[in-house]
């Protein structure tokens, strides 16, 4: 379409081509450069992180697939609703509240320890603000080789996909969508919708970045 629009401009016929690809039913392209970005943080790696608030934020990122800012600003007394957590709009990208289920005992255990550390506050110590805590987070993660923690969201997405469908995602070595039969494609689509919402994305398409095609 870019080539067609270029040609139309050269022959002064721009009006014969719609400006938006939506007019032709052409979806936006999604580039998946690396389908193996999932990461985890081991107990040994966490022990190397000296700041306990940073360490707790990393554990929350791993347990719930949170963004860095969400895990730093996390306030357990507000978020923990028993069987799910609620993220405040002021914590999230785009300023939209969302909920995530508490599905595993391991998640509950992480939350319980977060309560003990933060009390009624957040994972930003009372003598620091967000920017200060972010710099401390960045310093500790870089020094311990944990600087690219977006991979924790990839891991969360792939774990959820397997839970919801019963098979592993294409990014983790599972079957691509085109090889699935009709019922499996319905499951795949529904799982991607759930995961997109849990990760805080509006479009199901973005799940391709985390799960592959």
Image (cartoon, rainbow, N blue to C red):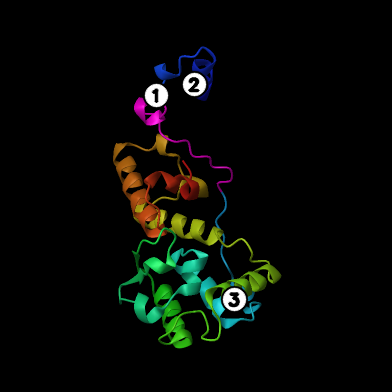
Callout 1 secondary element: loop
**Closer-to-camera residue (48/103):** 48
Q: Position of residue 78 (x, y in %)?
A: 35, 78
In the rendered image, the residue lying farthest to the right is 143
Relative to 51, does residue 102 appear above or below in the rendering? Answer: above
Could you say which is closer to the camera, residue 145 or residue 187? 145
In this figure, which residue is indicated by the disc labeled 1?
18
Residue 197: image tag: none
Name the residue tied to disc 2: 5
Q: Which element is circle 3 on?
A: helix
Above or below residue 185? Residue 139 is: below
Mark count: 3
Q: Splitting the image into 4 quarters, where does residue 143 fall?
A: bottom right
In this view, the residue farthest toward the front is 12
Contact between labelled residues 2 and 3, with CB atoms less than 8 Å apart: no
Q: CA distance from mark 3 to mark 2?
A: 48 Å
Magenta segment includes 25: yes
SS type, badge 2: helix
Q: Where does residue 209 sit, x and y in percent of width and height?
A: 49, 47
Q: Earlier in the sequence, mark 3 or mark 2?
A: 2
Q: Nearer the viewer, residue 100 or 118?
A: 118
Q: Is residue 173 visible?
A: no
């Amino acid at each position: 379409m870019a080539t067609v629009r270029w040609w139309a401009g050269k022959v002064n016929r721009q009006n014969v081509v719609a400006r938006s690809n939506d007019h032709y039913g052409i979806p936006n392209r999604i580039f998946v450069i690396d389908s193996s970005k999932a990461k985890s943080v081991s107990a040994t790696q966490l022990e190397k992180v000296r700041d306990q608030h940073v360490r707790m934020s990393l554990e929350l990122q791993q347990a719930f697939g949170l963004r860095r800012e969400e895990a730093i600003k996390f306030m357990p007394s507000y978020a923990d609703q028993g069987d799910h957590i609620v993220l405040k709009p002021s914590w999230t990208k785009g300023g939209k509240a969302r909920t995530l289920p508490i599905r595993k005992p391991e998640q509950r255990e992480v939350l319980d320890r977060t309560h003990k550390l933060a009390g009624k506050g957040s994972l930003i110590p009372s003598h620091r603000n967000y920017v200060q805590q972010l710099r401390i987070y960045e310093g500790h993660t870089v020094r311990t080789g944990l600087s690219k923690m977006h991979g924790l969201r990839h891991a969360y997405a792939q774990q959820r996909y397997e839970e919801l469908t019963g098979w592993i995602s294409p990014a983790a070595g599972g079957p691509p969508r085109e090889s699935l039969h009709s019922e499996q494609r319905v499951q795949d689509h529904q799982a991607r919708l759930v995961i997109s919402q849990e990760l805080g994305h509006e479009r199901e398409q973005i799940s391709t970045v985390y799960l592959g095609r």
